[in-house]
Image (spheres, helix red, strand yellow):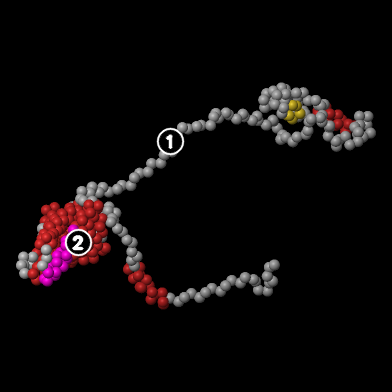
Amino acid sequence: MIQVCSQCGTRWNVRDRRRVWCPRCHGTLLAPSGPELGAEWSALSAGQATGPGGVGAAPAGAGRTPPRLPPGYRWIAVRPGAAPPARGRKRHLGPTPYYQSIPRWGLVEHFEAPEVQQVAPRSGPSAAMLRATLIATMVVLGVAALVHLVRYALLIINRSVLLNKVVAFGATWLGVLVSVVALFMVVATVVVLTNWLIARRATAFAYHGREDSRRLWALRAGCLVPLVNLFWAPVFVIELAGVEERLTWLRRPIVVWWIVWVFSTAVSLFSIATSFTQDSQGIADNTVTTIVAYLLAVAALVLVMKVVFGFERQPVERQVTRWVIVRDEDAAATDTDEAPKAEKQTEPEPEPAAEVESQGQNPAA
C-alpha cells in the first residue's frame, strides 16, 4: 500500500499498515485510493485454497496476475525494514567571505637564520678608492714620462738649433712640476695601500679567531720606510695570502710585482743620483733614465693593482674551496696485496644450464 504525502508529495510504501504522518516532513499522508492489499491478497489466497472447481474459485490465472494499481501509482522496490531516515536540511553557510586585503592568518613557517660568524667591520679604504688612487697615480706617472720624452726630443734639437727661452724654460720647469706631483701621488698611493693591508690583515685574522702576529707599528714601518718596504711589504702580503688560503693563486703575481718593484726602485735611485750632472750628454742620459724609471713605476703599479684586486675579488668570509680527487693509498695497498692471492685462486666452473624441457616429452603448447 502506498500513501502520498500532502505536503512534500513523497510516495511512501506503508505495506499493509496505514500511516498518518509523513516520515520526512511530518505532513499528513493521504489515504490510499485503491483497495487494501491485505484484503485483496487474502481473497486471492482463499480462492486458490478452494480450488478451481469450488464456489469461491478465482478466475484462471488470477494467482499469477498482480492486482491492478490505481492511475498515478507504480510498483517500486524498497529494502525491507523501517523507512529510510529523513535527509537533513543543508545548513546555510552565509555569504561568501570578502577581504579588503590579503589575509595574514594561517600557518606561518619560521626559518631560523644560519649562524654566521661575525666578521669585523671593514675600516680600511674601499675598493673604489683603491682603484681611483692607483689609476690617478699611473696617469700622473705616464704624463711625467711623456713630458720627459718631449724634453729629450728638445735636447736633441738643441744640439743644432738654439731653442726659444720660453720653450726651454717651459720644458725644464714643467718636468720639475710633473716630477713633484708624481712623487706626492706615489707617497699617497703607498699610504693608501698600507692602510688597506693593515685593515685586510686585521679582518682576516679576526675571521679565523686569531690575533695578527705583527704589531701595528711594525706593519707601518715595514710598508712606509723607504728601502725597508722593499723587503717587508711583500712578506706581509704573502702572510695575508697564507691566512686567507689564497697563496696558491696569488704567489706568482706577488713575486712578479716584487721583482718589478725592486728594479723600479733601483732605476729611480740611479736617476736621482745622476740628476745633478751639468754637461749636455749627462742631462740627456739622465732624462732617458728618468723616462725608464717612470715606465717601470707604472708597471709596478699595474702589478700591485692586480695583487690587490686578487684579494678584493672575494671577501674574507667567503673562503675558496676546491675539491680534488685524491687516490686512497690504503685501498690501493689493499688491492695490491690481494692481487696475487686472487691469481692463485681457481675460477669456479660454470654450472650447467638447467634444461628447459624434460627429456622424452613434447614441449607444452
Residue at image x 84%, y 32%?
67
User: Going 20% across and 48% down the picture, which residue do you hit?
Assistant: 123
**Residue 54 lies in what quarter of the image?**
top right
Disc 1 vs disc 2: which is toward the camera?
2
Asked if the magenta segment contains residue 299, the reply would be no
Q: Residues within 10 Å of mark 1 (few under 14, many from 20)?
A: few
The C terminus lies in quadrant: bottom right
Residue 190: mark: none
Q: Is residue 148 magenta?
A: yes
Other residues around mark 2 within 10 Å, as few (<14) / some (14–19) / many (≥20): some
Q: Does residue 64 appear left or right of residue 123 in this picture?
A: right
| Residue 199 pos. (x, y %) | 19, 52
Q: Position of residue 278 (x, y in %)?
A: 5, 67
Q: Is residue 328 left or right of residue 5?
A: left
| Residue at 54%, 29% in the rendered image | 95
Going by the numbered disc 1, the residue's amino acid type is Arg
Q: Circle 1 is placed at which residue position?
A: 104
Q: Is residue 348 left or right of residue 12?
A: left
x and y percent of residue 262 in the render?
15, 65
Q: Residue at x 14, y 65 (%)?
A: 151
The residue identified by callout 2 is 142
Q: CA distance from mark 1 to mark 2?
A: 64 Å
Q: Looking at the rendering, in which quadrant would you find the N terminus?
A: top right
Give above or below for 16 relative to 166: above
Question: What amino acid type is highlighted by mark number 2?
Answer: Gly
Q: Which residues are magenta?
A: 140-161
Taking the image as shown, residue 252 lies to the left or right of residue 161, namely right
Q: Could one spot residue 119 in this view of the protein?
A: yes
Q: Tag 2's secondary structure?
A: helix
